[in-house]
Amino acid sequence: MTSSIDDNIDFDLSDLPNKLSKSPYLTKTNSNGTLELDKDAYDDLLKKTIDSLDIVSRAFDKYSPNEIAFSFNGGKDCCVLLHLIHYALTKKCQSLRDQQQQQHRVEGEETRTPINNSCSVNSHQDSGTGDDKDINTRGTQGYISPEMNSLNNHKNNNNTNHEKINHSIPELRTLYFINDKCFPSVNEFTEKCAKLYKLNVTNISKGIKEGLEEVVEKYNIKAVFAGARNTDPHCEHLDDFTPTDPGWPQLMRINPILQWNYKNVWQFIHTFRVPYCNLYDQGYTSIGHIDDTIPNPSLLDASSGIYKPAHHLLDGSLERCGRIKKK
């Protein structure tokens, strides 16, 4: 696998059962020594993907895109969640356009009133005024999402010519907490994701609590998507929708992939060719900061001295073995 971002990314999740059933990453060796579909792995990932998309869809039913932010750290879990959110938002916008077109047909106004090709939400909210020293907002206005054309044509076309695409989705407010201890590779990867997934990235150089307080006040954010899994530290008590703790900015934390395990994450990434940071190809399995993260010792090939890629880790309980406890 490669972490490069190219035209082979599969944005279309509309035919999940068929695509997962054909995935070489959901197979096992049978008694004849040949590969066959691992039904348990297939059922597990299918259910979790459907459940996660449902959580994301419910979030967009409850909050407008302007009221939701996405906390992105460049890690593999966030990559999966970003892919799910992008598809769900695309599907929602397509549905809104279909409803609008149907209304125009009923009213007999197709020829008199142009159809709005963008999602009917205020996707470019005023970003505020003043000189932001700690919060830096970078938009990607004008980028057209490639999968919109495939949905309109009711087929998946991963090599869509961007010049022929005539629909767009609102930019997703994305929070990226950045400091001098972040891996340069993660910073660069985040920049690429911003362009590919049409993200409106807000760089936050303050602490998490302080940064959230400023974002909530400035942009009127009411909910935040997070790529937490219940095996992560301090996440075992979370639900799909969990309000922030007392003393923190009042937000609804939305955790669509809470039930996913380590293997699920890589199965999804490889099946749909989701981009991920190249550090995972160098033996990193859980990425924090430069001063607290090393390649996972469990992936070291003693004979060559080279670390295997992250997806080779078979025991998900060893995922955080590359994290160094700070004194």
Image (cartoon, helix red, strand yellow):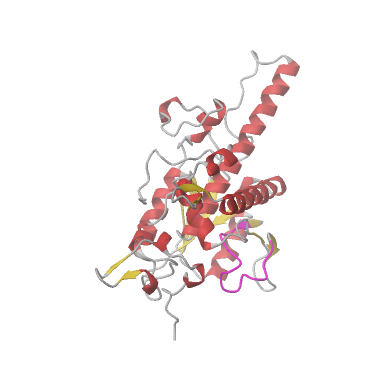
Quadrant in which the C terminus is drawn: bottom left
Q: Is residue 218 magenta?
A: no
Q: From the top left corner, tell me how far across and down residue 211 is, in percent.
A: 54, 66
On the picture, is 241 further left or further right than 18? right
Query: Measuring 46% from the left and 36% from the top, which residue is drawn there?
Result: 142
Number of marks:
0
Q: From the top left corner, tell me how far across and down residue 207 is, in percent.
A: 51, 71
Say if 291 sits above or below 310 in the image.
below
Q: Is residue 236 magenta?
A: yes
Q: Nearer the viewer, residue 39 or 237?
A: 39
Residue farthest to the bottom, as pictured: 327
Residue 316 in sight: yes
Say if 248 sits above or below 84 in the image.
below
Region in magenta = 224-239
Say if 108 sits above or below 43 in the image.
above
Q: From the top left corner, tell me how far across and down residue 260 is, in percent.
A: 58, 59
Q: Nearer the viewer, residue 53 or 26?
A: 26
Residue farthest to the right, as pictured: 106
Residue farthest to the left, as pictured: 304
Prevailing SS of the magenta stretch:
loop
Query: Measuring 54% from the left and 51% from the top, which residue is drawn there?
Result: 38
Query: Measuring 62% from the left and 61% from the top, which residue is drawn there?
Result: 259
Query: Measuring 53% from the left and 28% from the top, which residue is drawn there?
Result: 155
On the picture, is 97 further left or further right than 281? right
Residue 139 in sight: no
Q: From the top left corner, tell me how far across and down residue 213 is, in percent.
A: 60, 65
Say if 306 sits above or below 84 in the image.
below
